[in-house]
Image (cartoon, helix red, strand yellow):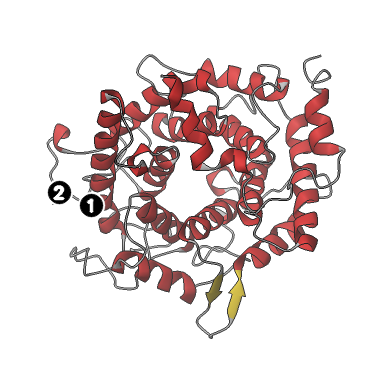
Amino acid sequence: MCKKITIILISLIFVNPLNVLPQNPAQKVDLSLAKEIDHSIKIGLKWLYDQQEDDGSWQHYPAISALVLSSFLRAHPSITTNETVISNGFGFLINCVKPDGSIFLDDMPNYNTAICLVAFKDANDPAFAEIIKNAESFLMGLQIDESEDYNQDSLYYGGVGYGGDERPDLSNLQWAIEAMAIDDLTAVEPEKNLTEEEKDRIENKKLFYDKALVFLSKCQNLKDVNPEAYAQNDGGFMYEPGASKADGTNSYGSMTYAGLKSLIYAKLDKDDERVQMAVSWIQSNYSVETTPLMGIQGLYYYYQTMAKSLNVFGMEEITDSKEIPHKWRHDLADQLLKIQSPDGFWVNENGRWWENNPVLVTAYAIMALEEIAGLPESTTVKKRKMIFKSK
């Protein structure tokens, strides 16, 4: 019954032409491709709409539900928490909020909290301000540092894992950094009058980023910043200090894009050697058909991380190892459009990291397409900062 009364959302997404990607100065692709992306996003969202559970979730899992909610909210500025499908989704997430600020059910508190935090920020709803603030505090509290008797010489200093006793890794850290970076008050103008609470949050975030950069250096194959014996020197990133999912300590695609995005969000200048060497690795290993060094394992995670990373870095063209220039937005969009099912969903035949789950993978793909096309004004950082004005 709840879904049947969500008439506004249905008409916005599934009836009116070219409404998911309105005319927008931030739009990054030509009109012809924008129309194709628009159609792809609409049928993808329609398929996701039909997968919502009676409790408002998608598959009764916080992180998956949050990814779906973000894919809806980033599609069009008119999609808000006033829509039944969205409010029911957030109702499920709110029921997952714990007294310590974490947002999860039974496992992986960092992973779930970070992804849910992004969705709460995407909602641009002042009602979620306290949830956002507490979730940020929880994530910062998970970071390995002096409070647990680690110092900067430790391989794990500055990292974040799944939560609990599991060792930190770049994948979990990049989710946490992304969640923290949205609505980041560390970029506010110096003359702005800040409350003491806002000043404390700024300082805590700066410390979080500084510590994260220490861990990122231990995951980067760059001897100038990573003196460990396991480090190679190609500029790419591995999964965790001394270990890669691509065997040994090899750099690979998804983690190198995750590393680049994290370096930028952690306030490194684009001319910094760490950033430039990561970009160099990406240029030498450019691909939209497979994940470099991993084939189709984690392919859709790679797609959404690639799109987010190149967007935040501001790179529009990549020249590969053969000196061939690529407009990555067009290449990646064409690939995603080609492999979408007629029903609107995507799925990976390789099930590693849950990628045989079409709900998870479809959310990844839609978010990648939204990054490719240019996000609507309602999801820019400037607009999102309104969340905190009510407190």
Percent position of residue 201, x then y: 29, 31
Whole-percent x and y of residue 172? 40, 43
Q: From this viewpoint, which residue is outermost toward the front?
A: 191
Mark before the other along the chain sequence, 2 or 1? 2
Residue 35: x and y in percent read 80, 55
**Mark linked to residue 214:** 1
| Residue occupying the point 31% across, 43% down | 168
Asked if labels 1 and 2 touch by Cβ distance under 8 angstroms, the answer is: yes
Question: The disc labelled 1 sits on which kind of residue?
Answer: Val
Tag 2: amino acid: Gln
Percent across and percent down for residue 298 are 55, 53
271 relative to 109, above or below: below
Specify whether residue 117 is in view: no
The residue indicated by pointer 2 is 152
Q: Residue at x 60, y 48 (%)?
A: 351
Q: Quadrant of the N terminus?
A: top right
Q: CA distance from mark 2 to mark 1?
A: 7 Å
**In the rendered image, the vertical position of residue 232 relative to residue 37, given as above or below:** below
Which one is nearer the viewer's eye here, 121 or 335? 121
- In what element is the residue under mark 2? loop
Q: Secondary structure at mark 1?
A: helix
Asked if residue 306 lies left or right of residue 42, the reply is: left
Q: Is residue 260 above or below residue 171?
A: below
Between 297 and 102, the one lying in front of the other is 102
Residue at figure coordinates x 54%, y 43% from the top left: 380
Judge left or right: residue 19 versus residue 354: right
Q: Is residue 165 left or right of residue 31?
A: left
Residue appearing at x 66%, y 52% in the figure: 369
On-image quarter of the C terminus: top left
